[in-house]
Image (cartoon, rainbow, N blue to C red):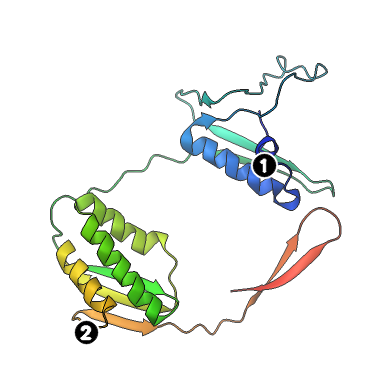
Amino acid sequence: MGSVKTNIGHLEAGAGIAGLIKATLCLQHEKIPPNLHFKKPNPAIPFDKMSLRVPIQLEEWPKNKGTRYAGVNSFGYGGTNAHVLLQQAPPRDTPQLIGPWDKPYLVPLSARSEAALRELAGKYAFFLTSQSGPRTLADFLHTLTQRRSHHSHRLTLIAQTQEELKEKLRLFSSGDYIGHQSMGVVRSNESPRLVFIYTGMGPQWWAMGAN
């Protein structure tokens, strides 16, 4: 049992999400951090009977055959009470890419302007020059498609080898035309959405536009 407040203090309306982040990191790294400045437990709390303990040093999360869980309590002064139960993530198989690509791949890039898009292509070309190997290429493609935000100015390239992709990125960043590319701008007609934020610290609220 611990509290993130010993590390960063009380974040008022952000206290609950801070505790959630800490619990998530504990599950990810399988570590239990110490509770800073904890010296003497409250004698009125029967820790032993309740099977509770406050860690005072970094500990390994015990490994057993069961699933690991972490609970986060967030009790607001204004009466907003919440409890979140987290479960460890399931094991994930890492895809293996061995040897050269066996077929052409569609490589997406995006940025907020054409100038930024060309600059980004140059940075990627430099990255592929300094890094090589099937694993690097697989991680690179995964990041482009799954881990980056897709902005309005977009470019797609078709490449079958790392050298071909690197050269096309370099040419595009220099302003040269390259084959097997598609470039365009996505226009959004959506109106800004209205977001209400209730802090739980009394009758306070904010409204803002969000895209």
Q: Which residue is mark 1?
A: 8
Rendered image quadrant of residue 2: top right
Decide if residue 115 is on the left or right side of residue 163. Answer: right
Q: Secondary structure at mark 2?
A: loop
Quadrant occupied by the N terminus: top right
Distance between the alpha carbons at the discs numbered 1 and 2:
52 Å
Q: Residue at x 24, y 79 (%)?
A: 181
| Type of the residue with mark 2 | Tyr
Q: Point out which mark residue 83 bears.
A: none
Q: Is residue 201 above or below residue 124?
A: above
Q: Residue at x 77, y 56 (%)?
A: 199
Decide if residue 149 is on the left or right side of residue 26. Answer: left
Q: Which residue is mark 2?
A: 177
Residue 192 position within the rendered picture, expressed as x and y whole percent measured from the top left: 62, 78
Q: How many numbered discs, if any?
A: 2
Crowding at mark 2 (Cα within 10 Å: few <14, some 14-19, many 20+): few
Can you see residue 154? Answer: yes
Q: Residue at x 62, y 23 (%)?
A: 55
Q: Is residue 100 above or below residue 40?
A: below
Q: Secondary structure at mark 1?
A: helix
Q: Residue at x 85, y 50 (%)?
A: 78
**Nearest the eye: 133 or 66:** 133
Residue 25 position within the rendered picture, expressed as x and y whole percent measured from the top left: 53, 40
**Nearest the eye: 102 or 139:** 139
| Type of the residue with mark 1 | Ile
Quadrant occupied by the C terminus: bottom right
Residue 118 position within the rendered picture, expressed as x and y whole percent measured from the top left: 33, 76
Decide if residue 162 is on the left or right side of residue 182. Answer: left
Can you see residue 161? Answer: no
**Nearest the eye: 103 or 58:** 58
Decide if residue 145 is on the left or right side of residue 169. Answer: right
